[in-house]
Image: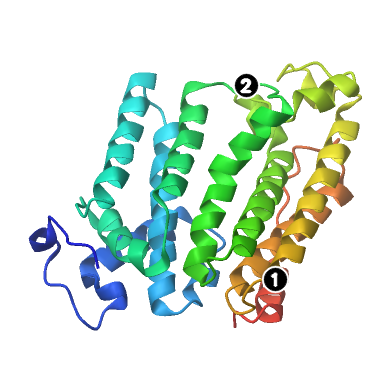
Amino acid sequence: MMAHADKAASGAIGRSTPLGVARQDLDAVETIVRAAGTSFYHGMRMLPADRRHAMYAIYAFCRIVDDIADEDGSLEEKRLGLAVWRDNIARLYQGRTEGPVTRVLAAAVPRFQLRADDFIAVIDGMQTDAETVVVAPDMATLDLYCDRVASAVGRLSVRTFGDASPAADQVAHALGRALQLTNILRDIEEDAQRGRIYLPLEYLRDAGVLADPVAILTAPGLPAVCDRLATLAHGYFRQARDAMDQCDPAAMKPARLMAATYDSILSVLERRGWKRLNERVSLPRWKKLWLACRYGLF
């Protein structure tokens, strides 16, 4: 395990605790995850203890940097907050930590071969949201954004789940894009109200839709754009499932659950259609439980 410069501040490290990390640090990180209200909290709880707490720390890191980018504050404050986390990650890989999240990550990094570049990619994605009002990015820009905010998290996750193979990275590549495109389709109205459009410029142009956050919600060509993006997302779901077949089956259980959950959300969105964007879509609790049972998390 990495040497901790602030080990004394974290209290005695319990030999019998997950990852060998102080219980108060584990509890502090788990509190961040519970407070976020993520639907995957209960799924993460099904993981073995070391993997579970590593995932909590990864999620907490993502939650913190996402909040820096999204919450009120000046651009300079956001840049400073993200710069602090760039420094935190660099210091972590030098064996120096600051606070519960980095202390848990410091134990998880060598245990699961987590790569610094993936943490930095997440911060880069958050910086895009902080510095830029995203309006109709071209496909290359959208793909890079999806890689940073979703696939990079996937690359950290699959290693924590137990598979660091090239095929697992392919799962992260495809599944991250599938999840993010589904989120984009789910949040069109909410994003437009914030002056943002994440739908790709090429699709909008082909359908004759103006890249205008106000006009886009009632544009006649919008359903065609959404159908096209949904087709792309379905293709990524298929790629992810194909790559999972080349991976460790046990390690892929959480990834299969995430894929099945979001693929179901995408199907519900398609059934609802693209003219009632104010109708929020989610899965009923019974469906979530059924998926969890099907993929062996209960």
Find the residue positioned furthest to the front: 166
Q: What's the image's color scheme?
A: rainbow
**Residue 275 x/y as whole percent:** 86, 35
Q: Residue furthest left?
A: 8
Secondary structure beneath dot 1 equals loop
Q: Is residue 122 left or right of residue 221?
A: left
Residue in the image at 39% along x and 49% along y: 116
Q: Which mark is residue 246?
A: 1
Assign the N terminus to one quadrant of the image: bottom left
Q: Nearer the viewer, residue 21 or 117?
A: 117
One can see residue 198 in this view = no
Lower position in the chain sequence, tag 1 or tag 2: 2
Say whether residue 50 is left or right of residue 121. Answer: left
Q: In which quarter of the view is residue 211 placed?
A: top right
- Numbered badge on residue 195: 2
User: Can residue 262 be seen from the camera position used here?
Assistant: yes
